[in-house]
């Protein structure tokens, strides 16, 4: 059964266009235990996620991605040269997990202000005060609404 997610990336770090060019990528650098647990325990191959550009003006949904590899150790945690290095991470206890994703479809830009203005998205985790998780679940109904707002007719597959 497909589950639905939202994954945040800052466009100056890894933009949608680069994902399309690369064809797939590992989703590394997540250093929040709740987000890690979602990737480790709940994300499965075939799950779909909204690719969200954060920390930009305006923040927005740029596309839809698919999980193409389930959780495995994030090697950047053990690389002293990485911005995501964690000295407590070891091969025996990697601490941090990543998944691989691939692009499914680009969406017309759906800005955060548009999401907030849509009453049908009330309760969407992204829109809750203080919600800063870089990986978060999205109810299927909300996922479908955002896809339609982005110009997609029917569910991506």
Image (cartoon, rainbow, N blue to C red):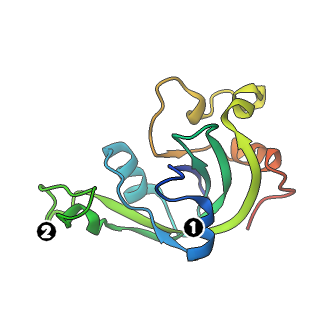
Rendered residue at 79%/49% (across/down):
150
**Which residue is at the front of the view, 57 or 111?**
57
Q: Is residue 31 left or right of residue 102?
A: left
Residue to which mark 1 is pinned: 18
Quadrant containing the C terminus in the rendered view: bottom right
Q: In this view, does 51 lie to the left or right of 30?
A: right
**Which residue is at the front of the view, 22 or 157?**
22
Extreme residue in the right direction: 153
Tell me which numbered mark, 1 or 2, is placed earlier along the sequence: 1
Extreme residue in the top direction: 129
The correct choice, above or below, for 123 with respect to 51 in the image is: above
Of helix, strand and loop, which one carries label 1? helix
User: Is residue 107 among the parts visible in the rendering?
Assistant: yes
Residue to which mark 2 is pinned: 92
The correct choice, above or below, for 85 with respect to 110 in the image is: below
The correct choice, above or below, for 129 with respect to 131 in the image is: above
Image coordinates for residue 7, horizontal then vertical, percent: 53, 51
Rendered residue at 60%/44% (across/down):
138
Image coordinates for residue 95, horizontal then vertical, percent: 22, 57
Quadrant containing the N terminus in the rendered view: bottom right
Rendered residue at 54%/43% (across/down):
54
User: Is residue 139 among the parts visible in the rendering?
Assistant: no
Image coordinates for residue 49, horizontal then vertical, percent: 60, 55
Circle 2 residues within 10 Å: few <14, some 14–19, many ≥20: few
Q: Do the residues labelled 1 and 2 touch (CB within 8 Å)?
A: no
Work out how far the residue at label 1 is from the one at label 2, CA to CA, in angstroms: 32 Å
Q: In this view, does 13 lie to the left or right of 124?
A: left
Of helix, strand and loop, which one carries label 2? loop
Image coordinates for residue 140, horizontal then vertical, percent: 68, 47
Q: Nearer the viewer, mark 1 or mark 2?
A: 1
């Amino acid at each position: 059964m497909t589950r639905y997610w939202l994954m945040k990336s800052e466009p100056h770090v890894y933009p949608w266009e680069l994902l399309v060019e690369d064809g797939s990528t590992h989703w590394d650098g997540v250093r929040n235990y709740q987000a890690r647990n979602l990737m480790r325990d709940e994300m499965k191959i075939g799950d779909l996620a909204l690719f969200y550009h954060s920390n930009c003006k305006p923040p927005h949904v740029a596309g839809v991605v698919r999980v193409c590899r389930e959780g495995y150790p994030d090697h950047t945690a053990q690389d002293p040269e990485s911005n995501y290095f964690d000295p407590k991470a070891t091969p025996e206890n990697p601490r941090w997990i990543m998944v691989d994703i691939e692009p499914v479809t680009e969406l017309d830009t759906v800005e955060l202000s548009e999401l907030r203005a849509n009453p049908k998205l009330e309760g969407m985790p992204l829109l809750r005060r203080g919600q800063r998780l870089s990986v978060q679940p999205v109810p299927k109904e909300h996922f479908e609404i955002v896809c339609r707002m982005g110009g997609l007719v029917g569910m991506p597959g």
